[in-house]
Protein backbone atom coordinates (compact mmCIF):
# COMPACT_ATOMS: atom_id res chain seq x y z
CA UNK A 1 0.00 0.00 0.00
CA UNK A 2 1.05 3.59 -0.40
CA UNK A 3 0.07 6.63 1.62
CA UNK A 4 0.91 10.31 1.72
CA UNK A 5 0.02 13.61 3.42
CA UNK A 6 1.94 12.40 6.48
CA UNK A 7 1.94 15.08 9.20
CA UNK A 8 2.55 14.83 12.93
CA UNK A 9 3.99 16.74 15.90
CA UNK A 10 7.51 15.93 17.15
CA UNK A 11 6.38 13.13 19.44
CA UNK A 12 7.42 9.51 18.90
CA UNK A 13 4.23 8.12 20.45
CA UNK A 14 2.11 10.12 17.99
CA UNK A 15 3.99 9.09 14.85
CA UNK A 16 4.11 5.44 15.99
CA UNK A 17 0.35 5.40 16.66
CA UNK A 18 -0.32 6.84 13.22
CA UNK A 19 1.93 4.34 11.43
CA UNK A 20 0.53 1.42 13.47
CA UNK A 21 -2.98 2.19 12.18
CA UNK A 22 -1.70 2.37 8.60
CA UNK A 23 0.21 -0.90 8.91
CA UNK A 24 -2.75 -2.65 10.54
CA UNK A 25 -4.95 -1.63 7.62
CA UNK A 26 -2.31 -2.94 5.19
CA UNK A 27 -2.37 -6.31 6.99
CA UNK A 28 -6.17 -6.42 6.85
CA UNK A 29 -5.94 -5.84 3.08
CA UNK A 30 -3.37 -8.69 2.88
CA UNK A 31 -0.69 -6.36 1.51
CA UNK A 32 3.01 -7.10 1.88
CA UNK A 33 4.65 -3.66 2.12
CA UNK A 34 4.02 -0.01 2.95
CA UNK A 35 5.35 2.63 0.60
CA UNK A 36 5.39 6.28 1.61
CA UNK A 37 5.06 9.22 1.42
CA UNK A 38 3.59 9.13 -2.10
CA UNK A 39 0.61 10.82 -3.70
CA UNK A 40 -2.25 9.55 -5.83
CA UNK A 41 -0.15 10.31 -8.93
CA UNK A 42 3.45 11.19 -9.71
CA UNK A 43 2.37 14.85 -9.97
CA UNK A 44 1.43 15.03 -6.28
CA UNK A 45 3.97 16.04 -3.64
CA UNK A 46 6.08 13.04 -2.68
CA UNK A 47 8.87 12.05 -0.32
CA UNK A 48 10.38 14.01 2.56
CA UNK A 49 12.87 16.83 2.61
CA UNK A 50 16.10 15.46 4.14
CA UNK A 51 18.55 18.26 3.33
CA UNK A 52 18.52 21.80 1.97
CA UNK A 53 16.29 23.16 4.73
CA UNK A 54 17.96 26.56 4.31
CA UNK A 55 16.82 26.82 0.67
CA UNK A 56 13.64 28.51 -0.53
CA UNK A 57 10.96 25.84 -0.93
CA UNK A 58 8.69 25.57 -3.95
CA UNK A 59 4.93 25.26 -4.20
CA UNK A 60 5.22 21.85 -5.89
CA UNK A 61 7.43 20.10 -3.32
CA UNK A 62 7.27 19.22 0.37
CA UNK A 63 8.95 21.38 2.98
CA UNK A 64 8.85 19.52 6.29
CA UNK A 65 10.60 19.79 9.65
CA UNK A 66 13.92 17.88 9.97
CA UNK A 67 12.36 15.50 12.53
CA UNK A 68 10.04 13.92 9.93
CA UNK A 69 12.63 11.59 8.32
CA UNK A 70 14.11 10.85 11.78
CA UNK A 71 10.75 9.54 13.01
CA UNK A 72 10.06 7.39 9.95
CA UNK A 73 13.50 5.79 10.17
CA UNK A 74 13.03 4.98 13.87
CA UNK A 75 9.82 3.21 12.88
CA UNK A 76 11.81 0.83 10.69
CA UNK A 77 11.45 2.42 7.28
CA UNK A 78 14.43 2.83 4.93
CA UNK A 79 15.05 5.27 2.10
CA UNK A 80 14.68 3.76 -1.33
CA UNK A 81 15.43 6.68 -3.67
CA UNK A 82 16.55 10.31 -3.76
CA UNK A 83 14.73 13.06 -5.63
CA UNK A 84 17.04 15.99 -6.35
CA UNK A 85 15.96 19.56 -6.99
CA UNK A 86 18.29 21.83 -8.97
CA UNK A 87 18.63 25.58 -9.22
CA UNK A 88 19.65 26.92 -12.63
CA UNK A 89 21.07 30.41 -13.06
CA UNK A 90 19.93 31.96 -16.34
CA UNK A 91 22.78 33.84 -18.09
CA UNK A 92 22.29 37.46 -19.05
CA UNK A 93 22.99 36.53 -22.67
CA UNK A 94 22.37 33.19 -24.38
CA UNK A 95 25.42 31.34 -25.66
CA UNK A 96 25.44 31.92 -29.46
CA UNK A 97 26.81 28.38 -30.00
CA UNK A 98 23.80 26.88 -28.24
CA UNK A 99 21.44 29.16 -30.15
CA UNK A 100 22.92 28.02 -33.47
CA UNK A 101 22.79 24.37 -32.39
CA UNK A 102 19.11 24.68 -31.48
CA UNK A 103 18.26 26.15 -34.88
CA UNK A 104 20.17 23.35 -36.60
CA UNK A 105 18.43 20.64 -34.55
CA UNK A 106 14.99 22.09 -35.24
CA UNK A 107 15.66 22.25 -38.97
CA UNK A 108 17.34 18.84 -39.26
CA UNK A 109 14.52 17.05 -37.44
CA UNK A 110 11.67 19.05 -39.00
CA UNK A 111 10.63 20.41 -35.61
CA UNK A 112 8.70 23.62 -35.03
CA UNK A 113 8.48 25.85 -31.98
CA UNK A 114 5.45 28.15 -32.46
CA UNK A 115 4.47 31.03 -30.21
CA UNK A 116 0.93 30.77 -28.86
CA UNK A 117 -0.95 34.04 -28.65
CA UNK A 118 -3.81 32.76 -26.50
CA UNK A 119 -4.56 30.08 -23.91
CA UNK A 120 -7.42 28.82 -26.08
CA UNK A 121 -5.02 27.78 -28.85
CA UNK A 122 -2.66 26.21 -26.34
CA UNK A 123 -5.42 24.23 -24.59
CA UNK A 124 -6.04 22.26 -27.80
CA UNK A 125 -2.73 20.44 -27.20
CA UNK A 126 -3.11 19.92 -23.45
CA UNK A 127 -4.38 16.32 -23.62
CA UNK A 128 -1.66 15.40 -26.13
CA UNK A 129 0.98 16.88 -23.85
CA UNK A 130 -0.15 14.84 -20.85
CA UNK A 131 -0.37 11.73 -23.02
CA UNK A 132 3.33 12.32 -23.69
CA UNK A 133 3.89 12.52 -19.92
CA UNK A 134 2.14 9.15 -19.44
CA UNK A 135 4.45 7.59 -22.01
CA UNK A 136 7.75 9.18 -21.02
CA UNK A 137 7.21 9.08 -17.24
CA UNK A 138 6.22 5.39 -17.23
CA UNK A 139 9.72 4.24 -16.16
CA UNK A 140 10.06 6.79 -13.34
CA UNK A 141 9.96 5.69 -9.72
CA UNK A 142 6.43 5.54 -8.28
CA UNK A 143 4.83 6.76 -11.50
CA UNK A 144 1.16 5.99 -12.11
CA UNK A 145 -0.52 6.70 -15.50
CA UNK A 146 -2.95 9.62 -15.41
CA UNK A 147 -6.58 8.86 -16.20
CA UNK A 148 -8.56 11.03 -18.64
CA UNK A 149 -10.27 12.71 -15.70
CA UNK A 150 -6.94 13.49 -14.05
CA UNK A 151 -5.58 14.85 -17.34
CA UNK A 152 -8.55 17.23 -17.55
CA UNK A 153 -7.87 18.32 -13.97
CA UNK A 154 -4.18 19.06 -14.60
CA UNK A 155 -4.91 20.86 -17.86
CA UNK A 156 -7.22 23.20 -15.95
CA UNK A 157 -4.70 23.49 -13.10
CA UNK A 158 -1.68 24.34 -15.28
CA UNK A 159 -2.71 25.50 -18.75
CA UNK A 160 -5.46 27.87 -17.57
CA UNK A 161 -3.26 29.27 -14.81
CA UNK A 162 -0.13 30.25 -16.73
CA UNK A 163 0.56 32.67 -19.56
CA UNK A 164 1.16 30.83 -22.88
CA UNK A 165 4.72 32.18 -22.99
CA UNK A 166 5.52 29.96 -19.99
CA UNK A 167 4.42 26.73 -21.71
CA UNK A 168 6.75 26.17 -24.67
CA UNK A 169 5.68 23.31 -26.96
CA UNK A 170 7.70 21.64 -29.75
CA UNK A 171 6.00 19.83 -32.64
CA UNK A 172 7.22 17.35 -35.23
CA UNK A 173 6.54 17.49 -38.98
CA UNK A 174 3.08 15.93 -38.41
CA UNK A 175 2.19 18.62 -35.87
CA UNK A 176 2.38 16.15 -32.99
CA UNK A 177 3.66 17.27 -29.58
CA UNK A 178 7.17 15.89 -28.98
CA UNK A 179 8.18 18.13 -26.09
CA UNK A 180 6.65 20.63 -23.70
CA UNK A 181 7.20 22.09 -20.26
CA UNK A 182 5.23 24.10 -17.73
CA UNK A 183 6.98 27.03 -16.06
CA UNK A 184 5.35 29.16 -13.36
CA UNK A 185 6.77 32.32 -11.78
CA UNK A 186 7.80 31.43 -8.23
CA UNK A 187 5.00 31.87 -5.69
CA UNK A 188 7.13 30.90 -2.68
CA UNK A 189 7.83 34.37 -1.28
CA UNK A 190 4.26 35.48 -2.00
CA UNK A 191 2.91 32.51 -0.03
CA UNK A 192 5.25 33.38 2.84
CA UNK A 193 3.92 36.94 2.89
CA UNK A 194 0.28 35.87 2.97
CA UNK A 195 1.03 32.90 5.28
CA UNK A 196 -0.80 30.55 2.92
CA UNK A 197 -4.11 32.46 3.04
CA UNK A 198 -5.76 33.97 -0.02
CA UNK A 199 -8.18 36.14 1.95
CA UNK A 200 -8.56 38.92 2.66
CA UNK A 201 -5.53 40.24 0.73
CA UNK A 202 -3.23 37.25 0.16
CA UNK A 203 -4.31 37.03 -3.49
CA UNK A 204 -2.68 40.42 -4.11
CA UNK A 205 0.77 38.98 -3.29
CA UNK A 206 0.17 36.02 -5.63
CA UNK A 207 -0.96 38.27 -8.46
CA UNK A 208 2.14 40.44 -8.07
CA UNK A 209 4.38 37.35 -8.08
CA UNK A 210 2.80 36.07 -11.30
CA UNK A 211 3.35 39.37 -13.09
CA UNK A 212 6.64 40.59 -11.63
CA UNK A 213 9.25 38.00 -10.66
CA UNK A 214 12.94 37.19 -11.11
CA UNK A 215 12.54 33.49 -10.30
CA UNK A 216 10.56 30.70 -11.95
CA UNK A 217 9.71 27.10 -11.05
CA UNK A 218 9.89 24.39 -13.72
CA UNK A 219 6.96 22.13 -12.84
CA UNK A 220 6.75 19.62 -15.65
CA UNK A 221 8.84 18.66 -18.64
CA UNK A 222 8.29 15.83 -21.11
CA UNK A 223 10.46 14.99 -24.12
CA UNK A 224 9.68 12.20 -26.58
CA UNK A 225 12.51 9.69 -26.25
CA UNK A 226 12.92 9.31 -30.01
Image: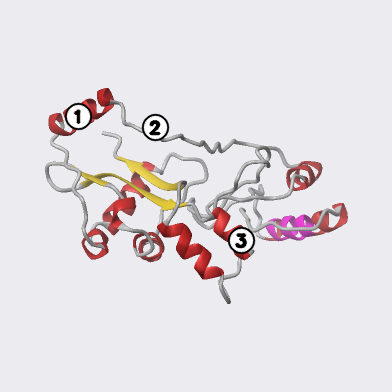
Q: Foreground: 217 or 45?
A: 217
**What residue appears at the point 33 percent right and 31 percent down from the top-left corner?**
93
User: In which quadrant of the rendered view does residue 119 lie?
Assistant: bottom left
| CA neighbours of label 2 inside 10 A, class few (<14), some (14 to 19), many (20+) | few
Q: What element carries label 1?
A: helix
Q: Nearer the viewer, residue 35 or 201?
A: 201
Q: Position of residue 146 (x, y in %)?
A: 41, 56
Cα distance between the residues tagged 1 and 2 = 22 Å
Residue 23 is one of the magenta-drawn residues? yes
Q: Residue at x 54, y 38 (%)?
A: 85
Q: Earlier in the sequence, mark 1 or mark 2?
A: 2
Name the residue at the top extreme.
Answer: 97
- The overriding secondary structure of the stretch rendered in magenta is helix
Q: Which residue is labeled 3 in the image?
A: 193
Percent position (x, y) of residue 199? 57, 75
Label whose residue precedes the other's in the sequence (2 or 3): 2
Could you say where residue 198 lies in the image, as x and y percent from the top left? Answer: 56, 71
* Residue 98 is a magenta residue: no
Q: What SS does tag 3 mark?
A: helix
Residue 26 lies in what quarter of the image?
Answer: bottom right
The residue pinned by badge 2 equals 91
Judged by depth in the image, the label closer to the viewer, 1 or 3, is 3
Give residue 32's position: percent from left, percent from top. 66, 48
Give residue 105's mark.
Answer: 1
Q: Residues within 10 Å of mark 1 (few under 14, many from 20)?
A: few
- Which residue is more in the foreground, 1 or 108? 108
User: In the drawing, does residue 12 fall left or right of residue 89?
Assistant: right
Q: Over which residues does the magenta segment extend?
A: 18-26
* Residues at discs 1 and 3 in contact (Cβ within 8 Å): no
The CA distance from mark 1 to mark 3 is 43 Å
Q: In this view, does 23 lie to the left or right of 210?
A: right
Amino acid sequence: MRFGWFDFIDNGSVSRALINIVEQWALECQLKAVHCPLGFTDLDREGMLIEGFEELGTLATHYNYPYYPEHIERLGYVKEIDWVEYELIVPLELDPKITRAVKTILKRNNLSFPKFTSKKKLLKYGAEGFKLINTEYAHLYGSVPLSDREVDHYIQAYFNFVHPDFIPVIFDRDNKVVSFCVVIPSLSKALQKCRGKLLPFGWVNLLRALNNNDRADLYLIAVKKK
